[in-house]
Image: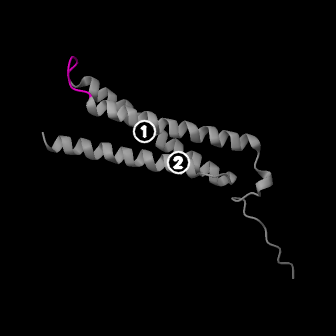
Amino acid sequence: MNTSLRSSPLSPSPASISRVAVWASRTLDVMLLGLCVVLVALSYYSFTLYCENFGCLGVGLLWMVWAVLATVGWVGALVLRAWQRRRGLCGRASGLASRALLVMGVGHLLYWLGKMALK
């Protein structure tokens, strides 16, 4: 009886992982973590910004830019993590970035809801 075990197409052998895929994965991980740092700095700036000259228009635009960047980054992190799993690459950094973006997004949403409730 022939009972040979075939490897799963989702877990390639380490020899089949190309250097270009590893380089691309690491580069995209660094870019995602860099986006998280930029969003933390933008969050700090938007929380310390007061409604002055333009009223609250500037603050609202800043929050909108933050929300778009966070959403695009979060979806990108999920896509990157799925690609890394499919290729058999390490996805710790993209997983960390997706969790950080999700936590920051929920935090911003709760802050905004609290601010609206106090008005």
Amino acid type at image mark 1: Ala
Q: Residue at x 23, y 18 (%)?
A: 54
Give, as a three-letter code, the residue at label 2: Leu
Magenta span dominant secondary structure: loop
Which of the two residues, 104 or 80, is positioned nearer the viewer here? 104
- Pointer 1: what residue? 70
Q: Quadrant of residue 109?
A: top left
Q: Please give left or right for residue 7 compared with residue 119 in the image.
A: right
Name the image quarter holding the C terminus.
top left
Residue 32 position in % (x across, y down): 53, 39
Earlier in the chain: of badge 1 and badge 2, it is 1
Answer few, some or many: residues within 10 Å of disc 2's Cα (few below 14, many 20 plus, some between 14 and 19): some
Q: In the image, is residue 50 part of the stretch drawn in magenta?
A: yes
User: Which residue bears the numbered disc 2?
Assistant: 78
Question: Was residue 53 drawn as part of the magenta stretch in this picture?
Answer: yes
Q: Relative to residue 31, is residue 12 drawn left or right?
A: right
Residue ID at (58%, 45%): 80
